[in-house]
Image: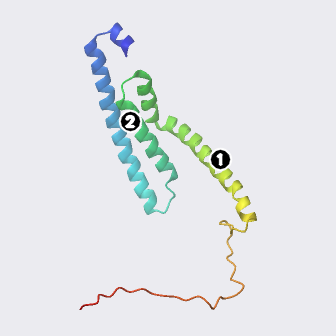
Amino acid sequence: MVQIHQQTSFLFTISLIIMTGVIGAALAKHQGLENLRKFQTGMAKGQPPADTLIDGLLILIAGAVLIAPGILTDIFGFSLLMPPFRSIIKKVLKAAFKKQTAVHFQNMSSFHQAGFPDPTSQAQSAPDHIDDNIIDVDFTSETIED
């Protein structure tokens, strides 16, 4: 921004900062509302919201970055508002999430060896015996008047 100011005028630099902030906020608002509509429609149809949630997060980041002054932040923010660039970032994030969950489930094997149940197993086995020493109690609250 300093170099732009040195090549142009102070008024032009301030106008550029305000203009990119206003245009960026308007675009982010428009795309955010469109994404919210897609989210609601998808949820009504019973579709998983992963893609729309990631899109919403990236649009939110774009809006925040566009408010900050700077040429690089503006380029990055406007890039996040472009669906083709956002889809590339989304693929990278989804791959990272999958890798993270794969590691998590891989590490769960030590819990199964220790006797904890496998959360991915479909069959739930019936207990080998029934314990007759279990007492079921319901509590009620009553007021005692003098």
Q: Which kind of residue does numbered mark 2 sit on? A: Ala
Q: What residue is drawn where x is 39% and y is 23%?
A: 70
- Residue that badge 1 annotates: 99
The quadrant the N terminus occupies is top left
Q: Earlier in the sequence, mark 2 or mark 1?
A: 2
x and y percentages locating residue 71 in the rendered image: 41, 21
Mark 2 is surrounded, within 10 Å at the Cα level, by few (under 14), some (14 to 19) or many (20 or more) other residues, namely: some
User: Which residue is at the far top?
Assistant: 7
- In depth, the one of 46 and 4 nearer the eye is 4
Numbered marks: total: 2
Left/right placement of residue 130 relative to residue 94 reads: right
Q: What residue is drawn where x is 33% and y is 27%?
A: 20
x and y percentages locating residue 140 in the rendered image: 38, 86
Q: What residue is drawn where x is 36% and y is 29%?
A: 68
Q: Which kind of residue does numbered mark 1 sit on? A: Lys
| Real-space Cα separation, disc 2 to disc 1, in angstroms | 28 Å
- In depth, the one of 33 and 71 nearer the eye is 71
x and y percentages locating residue 37 in the rendered image: 38, 52
- In depth, the one of 98 and 106 nearer the eye is 106
Q: How is the image coloured?
A: rainbow
Query: In what element is the residue under mark 2?
Result: helix
Q: What residue is drawn where x is 58% and y is 46%?
A: 94
Left/right placement of residue 10 relative to residue 3 reads: left
The quadrant the C terminus occupies is bottom left
Mark 1 is surrounded, within 10 Å at the Cα level, by few (under 14), some (14 to 19) or many (20 or more) other residues, namely: few
- In depth, the one of 115 and 66 nearer the eye is 115
Query: In what element is the residue under mark 1?
Result: helix
- Residue that badge 2 annotates: 64
